[in-house]
Image (tube, rainbow, N blue to C red):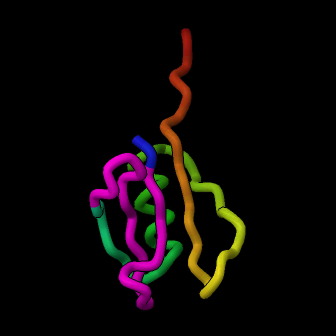
Amino acid sequence: MSLTISRYKGGRHWAVREADTGSLVVVTVYRKGAAEVVRRLTGQVPEKAKRQRRETFVYEAREPLEATT
């Protein structure tokens, strides 16, 4: 599962969505809160992408690699 974080409807809130389907997972007030949701769901800290127009940030987190023991 790959998740992205972007502005929700161009407003001040942030949306966490599934990258494959675009399904909405959660809407938060703060970008850091959305990043924390992604971290808790995937187990990885999301990577910050380059700043885009209108200060819209898109983060992506990929599933962690499975450890072979």
| Residue stretch in magenta | 3-23
Could you tell whether 45 is left or right of 21 in the image? Answer: right
Would you say 24 lies left or right of 47 here?
left
Residue pictured at 39% horizontal, 64% vertical: 16
Whole-percent x and y of residue 30? 46, 81
Indicate the quadrant where residue 2 lies. Answer: top left
Is 33 or 17 nearer to us in this picture?
A: 17
**Residue 3, percent from left and from top:** 44, 53
- Relative horizontal placement of residue 42, taking residue 54 as reference (left or right): left
Q: Quadrant of residue 29?
A: bottom left
Quadrant containing the N terminus in the rendered view:
top left
Q: Is residue 61 above or below residue 69?
A: below
User: How many labels sit on residues?
Assistant: 0
Name the residue: 41% across, 61% down: 37
Which residue sits furthest right?
50
Query: 68 and 22: which one is in front?
Result: 22
Identify the image quadrant of the C terminus.
top right
- Please say whether residue 19 is one of the residues in the magenta stretch: yes
Task: Residue at 65%, 63% (x, y): give it.
Answer: 48
Residue at image point 37% right, 77% down? 28
Expressed as whole percent of the image width and height from the top left, the position of residue 8 reads 38, 79
Q: Does 21 lie within the magenta span?
A: yes
